[in-house]
Amino acid sequence: MKFNTNPYPPKRIKTALLLAAGTGSRLFPLTQKSPKCLTLVNETSILERLIKSLNQHGFKRLVVVTGHLEDCIRDFLKTRAGNIKIEYVFSPLYKTTNNIYSLWMARKIINEPFMLIESDLIFESSLLTEMLYPDRIAIARMKPWLNGSTVTLNPSNKVNAFHSDSINGSNEIRYKTVNIYSLSVSSWYRVIEKLNQYILAGRVNDYYEAVFQQMVVEKSLSLQAVHFDHQPWYEVDTIEDLASAEKLFPIKTGKPLPLYALKSSELKKKAIPVRKSVLKDNFYA
């Protein structure tokens, strides 16, 4: 029998880091005069939904890495931060760099455990509950029409490998990364060391998952998986994604749109986008 030798449970994370520097080109023209995080999903912006979730979970600090139309973000948060202290880091190279550079820009301002979130995510607030502790990764079961970075898990529900795409030539189960991570201070410092190596090598257009991928291989980063399949979430990259997100998070009720286990072929007939996953009775990302 194994006993827990640590008498103190991990402290809940109170700091969040939001990467919001990108131009959101795939949402153009909506992002021509407004940053991606201020895109309205049924009359409520992605950022406002995030702030409400963070306040509900007792967050005290939010660091925002800005770039494209940063003044809009600052003006918006002046009156909507609630109990959260807002700090900013401006990324001057936001037009020519990727999110690895945005994450690197935060290396000097964060020295505590924190939650990393990207600015195009909309999700049910309760999903953050299990992400409030260090060294965790949000994932969802991979579906044929999803794309992007994936991970595989070991029997202990920890990430054993990152994959740069969704192509799976084996029978292993792949999970989509939701792009929400929680990091301990020790993990963050190791991430910074690796980020420094990438940036020094000129790899400013990589995704930060490339760093995580290498660190998992080297066993210098261990991430416990938190499954997001039981509640709705969505990644808004395109106009089509926005239409789907508005069906998933309707006005007033805030409940997922019941589709009564319709198959993807039936969804197409009803002109409902199916780029994201369909789970049982609800349309989930």
Image: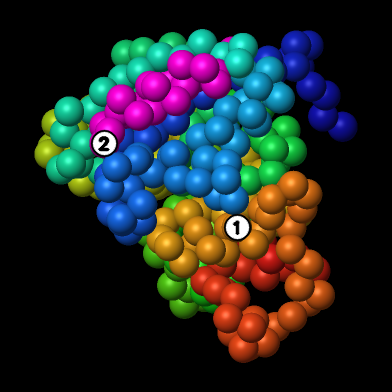
Q: Residue furthest right?
A: 1
Element on which disc 1 rests: helix
Give 217 or 203, whichever is nearer the viewer. Answer: 203
Quadrant position of the C terminus in the picture: bottom right
Q: Indicate the position of residue 154 as horizontal and vertical percent values.
A: 62, 52
Q: Residue at x 64, y 29 (%)?
A: 52
Residue holding disc 1: 246
Label 2 vs label 1: CA separation?
24 Å
Quadrant position of the N terminus in the picture: top right
Is 267 covered by the magenta stretch? no
In the rendered structure, which amino acid carries the disc numbered 2? His
Dot 1 crowding, Cα within 10 Å, few <14, some 14–19, many 20+? some
Q: Quarter of the image holding residue 82? A: top right
Q: Residue at x 21, y 46 (%)?
A: 205
In the rendered structure, which amino acid carries the disc numbered 1? Glu
Q: Earlier in the sequence, mark 2 or mark 1?
A: 2
Give 241 or 18, whichever is nearer the viewer. Answer: 241
Report the magenta residues as a range: 60-81
Q: Residue at x 60, y 76 (%)?
A: 272
Is 73 covered by the magenta stretch? yes
In the picture shown, does residue 238 fall above or below 42?
A: below
In the picture shown, does residue 201 fall above or below 241?
A: above
- Residue 90 located left or right of residue 174: left
Q: Residue at x 83, y 24 (%)?
A: 3
Residue holding disc 2: 68
- Residue 176 located left or right of residue 195: right
Coloring applied to the structure? rainbow
